[in-house]
Image: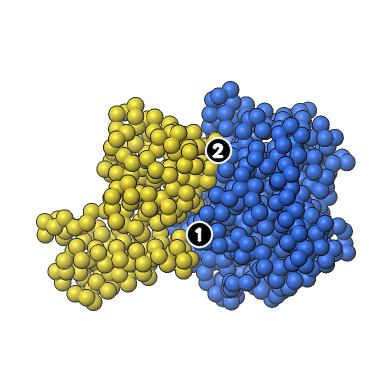
Chain colours: A blue, B yellow
């Protein structure tokens, strides 16, 4: 665990939520947060335009950074449990930024990964991508649970996984939040994941799977002998937009005390309370800074989404992830962020799923972020996660490093890829594409079926035609 | 009269509660037909709904416009009663995210689209117990109960709501719509919900279809 950033100031800062300026949630959203976000975005001339996906202009990033920083300093973060704002001074924020670590280690022993800070287009300071995060999110059938986990654990290019498949039932009983069945499900979930990791000889592999709604269910698996390891990572939530609560503070407090790690995300809902792409990018910087001040996160990532039709990989979501994330990366020495997209919109059995993965990974690898992949179907469809998707993200990232793509080249390339799936986001049908794990993996060998590999290889061949030297 | 109607609509388009109140008072003082006055407000909301879909206005602004609409309505509704006109009564909808689930954004999007489409939306917020939906639906005379669940573990609580309605013998009084990240058409069918909305726009469409309103 790395304790850093605000360095033990959390008691003081969380305590401000007991005495800070009172703001009811609606008042905060409409009369405090939103007007200031709009003003700052305008003041710094931050504008989205079609074609902007990977940032190429450092001045724009400086503007987004400054606006995001001012947003947090001006409006603070609302503790919805007390309906009071937690605010910080600029000196406090600057001091916390100076105290940030430059690298972090996730996992334990030979299976750990050390993630350094990485600059844009930096292909000489280590491997590209800096790392690869696989993600399993959404409901997973009981009979497939360990097979889906194995499909990630067996992939050598994947460094870190959010084993976050949700068990829907225990002994036929629905798993509801706060119920004892949620605790049982979490124990089964963590035990299964750890068993799978032992079987592939990666016992210290970092798991970031925060599955339960309730902290006490997460705590049920906090056992260093068989459960959550000290190299593992659990989620703390800055709720949209710029809000937190006692539950999140308890999560952070518990996991830091336990000795495990915390992950957090830039989480703008584009078209929702965070406004359009430009205001959402500004909000994203404020989100990441709020984590630094309140939760001493070990690792941060970018997870903006379109609010109307849930997509982590749309043209807007990629703009916000890349611009907001790059602004933070440029102005801090924090370890590399986990870039977009954390989950694809299309089902895993489709070409579009691979194109979404490529669009995210190209920008991420160029900007010095970790690449991510694995989950499809908006993380909502049953059994829509597999290791091949995350492997593909890593391969795209490697090809970016081999080609030493500039940001301008990366932006051009992603703009050639977007037309392959964005129209299906525009008409809200992309989630209907592609089959699930049963249709794409051989359930006996836990390997991708030949017809699935054909789709994966077809997209790779087309990427090569577009100039990306992917193997 | 056209001027006052323009002011009413303009106040909504500017998300301005004070201006909406002023315009409503002016409409009453000038003896403007309250049905037409409310129609002007609704037109404004409708236009905002279209702009919202195109990402030209955003959720906080719709929330402010909705407040302005409600404030003006409080002035205009007594006039409607006095004139013994029925007007077009907005259909009450109770909406919330189900118990155990604190996800707000998707539910807010649906509530916003329902509001701009002319429904009378009663938003219970997040982490709402099934019994609370029932209580509010009875209180406001709701025709529709819209329930969001964003997580696999909170989805089963949607079924609890339908079980409660059946147990109380009031299931047929309400159209129950379900939605949210992990909710599917199959799930909606399995728990015998009346409709499923893949997203906010689809939810409004299904609500209108089931209520036979244009």
Q: Position of residue A4 (x, y in %)?
A: 76, 52
Q: Position of residue B103 (x, y in %)?
A: 51, 46
Q: Nearer the viewer, residue A13 or A35?
A: A35
Foreground mark, 2 or 1, reads 1
Q: Quadrant of the N terminus of chain A?
A: top right
* Chain assignment, label 2: B
Q: Which residue reaches farthest top?
A: A171
Crowd class of label 2 (few under 14; some 14 to 19; many from 20; radius 10 Å): many
Q: Nearer the viewer, residue A9 or A163?
A: A163
User: For residue A61, what is the image quadrant?
Assistant: bottom right
| Dot label at residue A89 | none
Q: Is B209 displayed left or right of A230 in the figure?
A: left
x 36%, y 67%: residue: B47
Q: Quadrant of the C terminus of chain A?
A: bottom right
Q: Find the distance from the CA under tag 2 to the CA under tag 1.
A: 25 Å
x 44%, y 48%: residue: B197
| Dot label at residue B152 | 2
| Dot label at residue A427 | 1
Secondary structure at numbered mark 2: loop
Secondary structure at numbered mark 1: loop
Q: Is A36 displayed left or right of A98 in the figure?
A: left
x 83%, y 37%: residue: A202
x 28%, y 69%: residue: B8
Image: A372 above or below A200: below
Q: Is B143 displayed left or right of B129 in the figure?
A: left
Same chain, labels 2 and 1:
no
Q: Position of residue A104 (x, y in %)?
A: 80, 50
Q: Is residue B111 visible?
A: yes
């Amino acid at each position: 665990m790395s304790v850093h950033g605000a360095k033990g100031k959390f008691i003081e800062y969380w305590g401000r939520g007991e005495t800070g300026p009172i703001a009811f949630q609606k008042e905060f959203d409409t009369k405090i947060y939103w007007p200031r976000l709009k003003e700052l975005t305008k003041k710094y001339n931050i504008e989205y335009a079609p074609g902007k996906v990977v940032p190429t202009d450092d001045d724009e990033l400086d503007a987004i950074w400054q606006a995001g920083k001012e947003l947090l300093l001006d409006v603070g973060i609302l503790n919805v449990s007390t309906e009071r704002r937690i605010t910080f001074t600029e000196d406090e924020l600057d001091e916390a930024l100076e105290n940030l670590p430059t690298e972090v280690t996730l996992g334990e022993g030979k299976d750990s990964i050390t993630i350094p800070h990485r600059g844009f287009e930096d292909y000489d300071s280590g491997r590209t991508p800096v790392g690869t995060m696989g993600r399993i999110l959404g409901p997973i059938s009981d009979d497939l649970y360990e097979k889906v986990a194995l499909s990630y654990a067996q992939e050598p290019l994947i460094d870190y996984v959010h084993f976050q498949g949700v068990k829907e039932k225990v002994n036929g009983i629905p798993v509801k939040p706060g119920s004892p069945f949620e605790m049982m499900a979490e124990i089964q979930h963590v035990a299964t994941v750890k068993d799978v990791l032992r079987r592939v000889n990666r016992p210290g592999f970092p798991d970031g799977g925060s599955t339960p709604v309730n902290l006490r269910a997460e705590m049920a698996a906090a056992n260093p002998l068989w459960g959550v390891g000290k190299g593992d990572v659990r989620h703390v939530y800055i709720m949209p937009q710029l809000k937190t609560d006692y539950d999140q503070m308890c999560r952070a407090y518990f996991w830091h005390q336990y000795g495990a790690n915390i992950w957090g995300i830039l989480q703008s809902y584009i078209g929702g309370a965070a406004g359009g792409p430009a205001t959402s990018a500004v909000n994203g910087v404020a989100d990441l800074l709020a984590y630094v001040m309140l939760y001493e996160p070990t690792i941060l990532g970018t997870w903006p989404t379109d609010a109307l039709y849930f997509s982590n990989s749309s043209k807007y979501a990629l703009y916000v992830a890349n611009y907001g994330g790059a602004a933070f990366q440029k102005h801090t020495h924090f370890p590399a962020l986990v870039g977009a997209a954390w989950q694809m919109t299309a089902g895993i059995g489709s070409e579009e799923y691979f194109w979404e993965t490529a669009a995210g990974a190209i920008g991420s690898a160029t900007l010095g972020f970790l690449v991510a992949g694995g989950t499809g179907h908006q993380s909502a469809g049953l059994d829509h996660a597999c290791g091949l998707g995350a492997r593909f993200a890593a391969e795209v990232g490697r090809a970016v490093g081999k080609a030493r793509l500039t940001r301008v080249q990366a932006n051009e390339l992603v703009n050639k890829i977007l037309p392959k799936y964005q129209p299906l986001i525009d008409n809200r049908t992309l989630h209907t594409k592609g089959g699930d794990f049963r249709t794409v993996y051989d359930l006996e060998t836990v390997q991708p079926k030949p017809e699935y590999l054909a789709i994966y290889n077809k997209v790779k061949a087309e990427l090569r035609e577009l100039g990306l030297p992917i193997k | 009269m056209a001027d006052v109607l323009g002011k009413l609509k303009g106040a909504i388009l500017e998300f301005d509660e004070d201006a909406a109140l002023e315009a409503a008072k002016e409409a009453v003082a000038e003896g403007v037909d309250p049905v037409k006055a409310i129609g002007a407000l609704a037109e404004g909301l409708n236009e905002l709904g279209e702009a919202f879909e195109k990402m030209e206005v955003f959720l906080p602004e719709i929330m402010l416009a909705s407040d302005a609409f409600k404030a003006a309505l409080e002035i205009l509704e007594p006039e409607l009663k006095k004139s013994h006109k029925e007007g077009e009564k907005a259909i009450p909808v109770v909406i919330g995210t189900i118990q155990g689930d604190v996800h707000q954004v998707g539910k807010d999007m649906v509530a916003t689209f329902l509001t701009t489409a002319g429904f009378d939306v009663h938003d219970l917020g997040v982490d709402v117990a099934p019994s609370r939906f029932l209580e509010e639906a009875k209180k406001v005379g709701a025709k529709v109960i819209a329930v969001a669940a964003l997580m696999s573990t909170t989805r089963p609580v949607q079924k609890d709501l339908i079980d409660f309605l059946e147990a109380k013998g009031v299931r047929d009084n309400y159209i129950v719509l379900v939605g949210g990240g992990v909710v599917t058409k199959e799930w909606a069918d399995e728990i015998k919900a009346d409709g499923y909305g893949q997203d906010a726009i689809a939810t409004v469409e299904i609500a209108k279809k089931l209520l036979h309103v244009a």
